[in-house]
Image: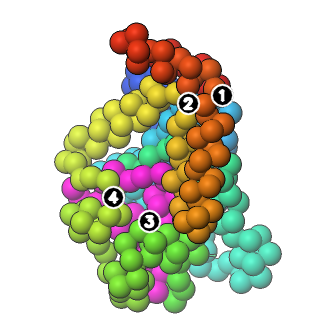
Amino acid sequence: MTFETITAEPNAQGNSGVTLITLNRPKALNALSSVVLEELITAFAAFQADETQKCAVLTGAGEKAFAAGADIKEMSDKPAADFYLDDFFSKWTSHLVKTTRKPWIAAVNGFALGGGCELAMMADFIIASDNAKFGQPEINLGVAPGMGGSQRLTRAIGKSKAMEMCLTGRMMGAEEAERANLVVRVVPQADLLADALKSAATIASKPPMAAIANKEMVNAAFEMTLEQGVIMERRIFQILTASEDKAEGMAAFIEKREGKWKGR
Ligand code: CO8
């Protein structure tokens, strides 16, 4: 599959079952234009539909940015009615967060600002390079986050830090982002992609249906009461006990061998 503003590579760098998707407008710091949006939706749909692919990594081309936000040049003279009538960015969230049921990781390799930070936070988790910088600087443009930043950032790092970042537009460095639980870990920039691909390959080696179920359960913690979430978890667990992979996984443990997964 060829794209204009991104690349998508199934079985990336020899990692079976791992799709690498790269935002590829480094001169514009991988700003998220409407073409990027459409292409990302297509790439994620292809990843979701391809039974051989189990986990994806999303990163940015170049050494400076994951994505420096929505494309300001494209938005600058767009009438408000168009933002509203097109329900700007809603398709993105629904495709990347809801339709993509398989796990995916954001490997943040520099600036992740505005829509870039919001895009990273749509991932199941974030691994950051040591030069990563996160921020919601929309206030400097006379607007505010529009792709979930005010909600996901607040849930991830708490009210005080999220509020301060949205109100001042300041950037948060990688070390602080790790302390604040925004990212899983920080690695040297040169090692970022290898680290993220390794993590994705580990996930891709797990029973695929169980991986989807684990993702669904953890995400439910943000949407449900504790009681509802615990019931939902128990029901999914019970459903998984009927899977062929459960029989295989437990037999493999007892027979001291690796499991061979069917994904059902
Ligand atoms: N959009 C378009 N182009 C961009 C963007 C962007 N977000 N960010 C950088 N670029 C371009 C620059 O214009 C420049 O292009 P050119 O060479 O043609 O002038 C090139 O990338 C390199 O950028 P800089 O020269 O500025 O590089 P610096 O290293 O000096 O600065 C920064 C890097 C600090 C990242 C700086 O580029 C910057 O502040 N960028 C904008 C960051 C920002 O404000 N992001 C938020 C955008 S708004 C947003 O995401 C809102 C989403 C929700 C909207 C919801 C509506 C419903």
Residue that numbered label 1 is attached to: 242
What span is in magenta? 110-139
User: Mark 1 and mark 4 in contact (Cβ < 8 Å)?
Assistant: no
User: Mark 1 and mark 2 in contact (Cβ < 8 Å)?
Assistant: no
Residue 73 vs 128, above or below: the answer is: below
Q: Position of residue 159 (x, y in %)?
A: 40, 82
Quadrant of the image containing the N terminus = top right
In 3D space, how far apart are the residues under numbered discs 3 and 2 (Cα atoms)? 28 Å
Select label 3 or label 2 by which is in front.
2
Residue that numbered label 2 is attached to: 208
Q: Would residue 191 be found to the left or right of residue 120 on screen?
A: left
- Dot placed on the residue nearer the N-terminal end, 4 or 3: 3
User: Under tag 2, what secondary structure?
Assistant: helix
Select label 2 or label 1 by which is in front.
1
Residue ID at (49%, 69%): 152
Residue ID at (22%, 42%): 190
- Dot placed on the residue nearer the N-terminal end, 3 or 2: 3
Question: In front here: 180 or 128?
Answer: 180
Residue that numbered label 3 is attached to: 117
User: Under tag 4, what secondary structure?
Assistant: loop
Q: Position of residue 6 (x, y in %)?
A: 53, 44
- Dot placed on the residue nearer the N-terminal end, 4 or 2: 4
Q: Position of residue 176 (x, y in %)?
A: 23, 68
In 3D space, how far apart are the residues under numbered discs 4 and 3 (Cα atoms)? 11 Å
